[in-house]
Image (cartoon, grey):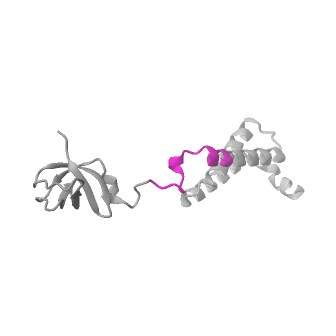
Amino acid sequence: MDDLLYLLGDVRPWHWWALAAILIAVEIMSPAFYFLWPGIAAALVGVLLLIFPGMSPSAQILVFSVCAVAATVAWKRLAPKAWSPTEPHPTLNRRAAQYEGHKARAAVDFSGGEGAVIVGDTRWSAATEDGSNPVAGEMLVVTGAEGIVLKVRKAEI
């Protein structure tokens, strides 16, 4: 430990800023958010060393360690759930389900409650909820999806 402290005896603020830049560069190459917080902690130690030039190497390492661990733990506990990679969006990889609530136009005359609709610029197979047979051009609303078949009903005007 004494050898490490001796090595750190002549550390300047730019040393900490260089470490911060390296850690943040590693973070950019990885999606984990684990190198970002130590990088920010290293930058903070560099700023503190600029303000308090007499800070001992032991104090620098202590401040860096505490800030890095505290920031990482705080991020993992307080991060918004939208950023959590373990909880994907409910309609991810279910494109048909993403159209629920959108307006659609009947592309063909329905027969037996089945036909095709245009949603945006895409043509989809569709089935009516109540078995009705809309005519081509009639406005419908997407109420759900079963596989790649959209469930539709007549749009209320």
Left or right of residue 83: residue 57: right
Pick the residue in front: 102 or 33.
102
| Point 11% across, 52% down: residue | 137
Res 96 quadrant in image: bottom left
Relative image position of residue 42 (x, y in whole percent): 69, 48
Relative image position of residue 76 (x, y in whole percent): 63, 49
Relative image position of residue 73 (x, y in whole percent): 68, 48
Asked whether 82 falls inside the magenta stretch, the response is yes
Examine the rendering and report whether any part of residue 100 can be seen: yes
Q: Which residues are magenta?
A: 72-89
Q: If the image is split into quadrants, where does the N terminus sit?
A: bottom right
Pick the residue in front: 42 or 99.
99
Asked whether 19 falls inside the magenta stretch, the response is no
Q: Establish if 149 lies above or below 63.
A: below
Examine the rendering and report whether any part of residue 17 can be seen: no
Query: Residue pushed farthest front?
Result: 130
| Point 52% across, 50% down: residue | 83
Pick the residue in front: 101 or 93.
101
Relative image position of residue 128 (x, y in whole percent): 21, 55
Q: Establish if 64 lies above or below 121.
A: above
Pick the residue in front: 60 or 153.
153
Q: If the image is split into quadrants, where does the C terminus sit?
A: top left
